Image (spheres, grey):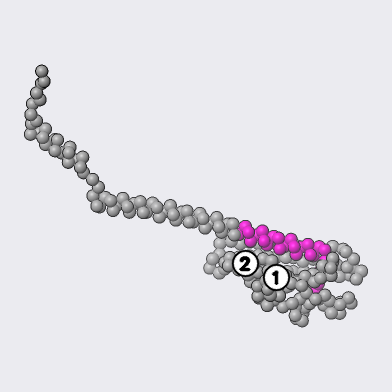
Amino acid sequence: MIERQPPPTDYMKTIIKKEKKSENKGFTLIELIVAIFIFSVILTGILSVSVSILNAYQKARSVKTLKESADFALSSIAKDVRMGKIESPFTVNGSPHANDGITKDEYFAVTRNRDQEVACYHVVGSYLGVATGTPGSVDHSTPADCPHDDGIDVTGNYSRIVDLTGTGMNFDPVTSGFYSLPTDSTTRGWVEINLNIKSDAGKEMEADQINVQTTVSSRDYGWENN
């Protein structure tokens, strides 16, 4: 025998209507806009942090590459000095240059012992370049001569062994250069090499400063007897 349920009362009908109404309730337009706004703020923050991290990584990598290039250039110059003769006085396209160990010069000349070739170095602005000079006379009455740097790229007078073009950095004109004394009958000579790289004006950051410096003496390979 099936037991018949009593018909719902008015109170129960009201509760059932409320439950059905709550089941059909969704997001309002205002709630949706607020949710989208919050999501956009969070996404913007994540993207900003990601971009900052990527930029910092790329900058650190660029600085590391420049530091390695400067170290390599310094090692190359040091090798020429150890195996050669530091020239002073010398000329640059006929203009006299005389290094006294006190005055900084943006040019530097050394005669390589192995082939008597004059290697001329020039550090200026966005690059460090090297060129082949003209040897001086045996009696030293005519000094070795270096070509004038025409400021053109690797097709010019000086091949760039460190090129900062497009990096936002340059060799510091105040501190970058060469201090040297010549190799002669009384001294083997020495050179202090300063390759100091800094950011362009208005972009200075401590991490962007690259300072490479060393002092090298030439060795005795019979220059004293020449």
Q: Residues within 10 Å of mark 1 (few under 14, many from 20)?
A: many
Q: Is there CB contact under 8 Å for labels 1 and 2?
A: no
* Residue type at numbered disc 2: Leu
Q: In this picture, which residue range is highlighted in magenta?
A: 63-90
Residue at label 1? 159
Q: Quadrant of residue 130?
A: bottom right
Q: Is residue 73 above or below residue 26?
A: below
Which residue is at 19% across, 40% downward? Answer: 22
Does the magenta-highlighted stretch encompass residue 89? yes
Q: Is residue 101 visible?
A: no
Residue 144: x and y, percent? 81, 76
Q: Please tell me how crowded label 2 is: few (under 14), some (14-19), or many (20+) other residues with Cα within 10 Å.
A: some
Q: Position of residue 158 (x, y in %)?
A: 70, 72
- Residue 151: x and y in percent read 66, 76
Amino acid type of the residue tagged 1 in the rendering: Ser
Image quadrant containing the C terminus: bottom right
Residue 130 is marked as none
* Most distant residue in the bottom direction: 94
Dominant secondary structure (helix, strand or loop) of the stretch shown in magenta: helix
> Left or right: where does residue 71 sit relative to residue 4?
right
Quarter where residue 174 is shown: bottom right
Q: In the rendering, which numbered label is found on residue 164?
A: 2
Can residue 152 be seen at all in this image of the molecule?
Answer: yes
Secondary structure at numbered mark 2:
loop
